[in-house]
Amino acid sequence: MSFSATLRDVTLKYRDSDALADVNLELEAGKIYGLLGRNGAGKTSLLSLLAAFRKPTSGEILVGGEPVWENVGIVSRVALIREGGDFDDSDSVKAAIETGQIRPGFDTAYALKLAERFELPLKKKVRELSRGKRSVLAAVCGLAARAELTMFDEVHLGMDAPTRDAFYKELLAEYMDRPHTVILSTHLIDEVANYLEEVIIVDRGRILRHEEVEVFQGMGATLTGAAAAVDEVAAGLEILAEQQLGGTKSITVAAFDPGTRERAAAAGLEIGPVGLQDLFIHLTEPSRNGA
Amino acid sequence: MPALQHLTLPNRRFTLGLGMAAEGLNYFKYWILAAVAIAFLGPLALSRYNEIDLSTWFYTANVAKWFTSFVAGGFLYVLVPNMIAAGMTRRELSVVMGVFGFLWSAALGALVVAGFLVERVYYDAMGWSQGVQGDDATTVIGTWGETAAFAAVHPLMYLAYFAAGALVGAAAYRWQSSGWLLVFPVLVVVFSLDNAVYDTEPFGPAWAGVLGRFMDDWGRGLVLTGVAVVAAGLAIAARRILIDIPLHSKKA
């Protein structure tokens, strides 16, 4: 069983400012979602509401069809893993893992297996861990929670590239083994793009887009070939990203219509899907400089 | 924490409260042993130079009140993000703290009662006088019955101090910059009542006993009823703060 999630007219205020405003969102059970947004867009606020870390100022939040707030049957099967995890720093790594047993579904044997695989020092205090190892500990606890809705909020930020890759693979293996709902909030967009089924883009406290990955990828294209040919086909199109190496050029364009596709094919250009990151930058107004 | 792997959803709040009390006592066992050793060996050393007419255990029992407050506040401050992030509801956490508070106060109270009685035997054997510092003079605690009655209020006092610590801990987490300020009014109420129980000199900051002047005429029964009411009020207030407490964002 995995949980669906619904937000209806949800607003969350921090004092006078809206972290989220009138958000409506439907997430089907059993899918892997990517949650994208610029700094301060409202991603963490959204996840905090789904995990009942916070109460909305107004609106309704349902997880698995039931209100999530103070619902022991639901929150015990929802896991939000924040960067660095929520641990007692004076605990040993082993004790921090065992705290997860508060959840009836927590798989301690799996957690310890992952801890060994990711070389977590079980006897060390949590406060003595490096940022990367702390991130790994949080990820291990999240995976071993065996929750019906698991959310990772930038949890892999402190990990190095091989560890992140191993984490994504483990996440996918766990998902294949036990289908459940996963939300990955991240800035490392292209790294996770292949794992996602749907993407939600949050901007300034509102849902900007919520589509399947294929829909996003169909919103544009990447054209690669001889620089002159690329420039000719791309003339008049909105360019999202551009790279050139010697005489070969690659550009990412938005709004790629069938006519342009034919011209590109006729010019011998290689046509690829648009990069999610380029599209995300385009959709969230690159001229606006956030933190 | 013991036996977490056998938790079930309906009983986990009680099991955790029990585990927390056991874990807390186990964690501080060397502190407690050190306090016992100092309370009983200290007078032996001092007796070479001075006449012993004060109960050192009385001071140990008073230090334990402050200690109890710090334990309650500190544990709650740490537990709020940990337990909620681990899939526990705030209502469950308030029950965990309630069970923890009762068991902690009962265990520490039992230890203190036993300590007073053992000290009584010890002081009698050494020919010392088991007294407490009153408002004007040292008062001998009295007969065995009076010693037992003197000691018996401590579990209730620990409960009040536990509730006070829990309230301040919850407020300090909820309002990170200002919540701890609640310590002042809470301390004044609890400390004044505590001092009114025996008309002893304030054991702690004198200003905190400022309300004592209004309780001078209260009988012991009324003061103890006041302690019980205040303990319940503080526990209710702590639960109220806890019940919709938001988890703070993580700092980068």
Image: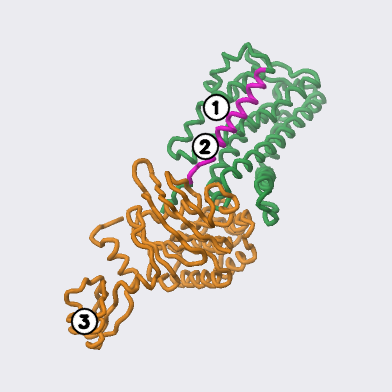
Whether marks 2 and 3 lie on the same chain: no
Structural crowding at the residue carrying mark 2, measured as other residues with C-alpha within 10 Å and reported as few (<14), some (14–19) or many (≥20): some
Q: Is residue A110 visible?
A: yes
Vertical comparison of A217 with A28: above or below = below
Mark 3–mark 1 distance (CA, rounded to whole Å): 76 Å
Q: Colour of chain B?
A: green
Question: In the rendering, at what x and y percent does residue B192 appear?
Answer: 58, 21
On the image, numbered disc 2 is attached to which residue? B241
Q: Is-magenta flag for residue B80?
A: no
Specify the amino acid type for callout 2: Ile
Structural crowding at the residue carrying mark 3, measured as other residues with C-alpha within 10 Å and reported as few (<14), some (14–19) or many (≥20): many
On the image, numbered disc 3 is attached to which residue? A230
Mark 2–mark 3 distance (CA, rounded to whole Å): 63 Å
- In the figure, is residue B233 to the left or right of A261? right
Question: In the rendering, at what x and y percent does residue B64 appear?
Answer: 65, 33
Chain of the residue displaying label 1:
B
- The mark closer to the camera, 1 or 2, is 2
Q: Are marks 1 and 2 in contact (CB under 8 Å)?
A: no
Chain of the residue displaying label 3:
A
Chain of the residue displaying label 2:
B
Q: Are marks 2 and 3 in contact (CB under 8 Å)?
A: no
Specify the amino acid type for callout 3: Val
- The mark closer to the camera, 3 or 1, is 3
| Foreground pick, A223 / A108 | A223
- Judging by colour alone, the chain drawn in orange in this rendered image is A
Magenta stretch, residue numbers: B222-246
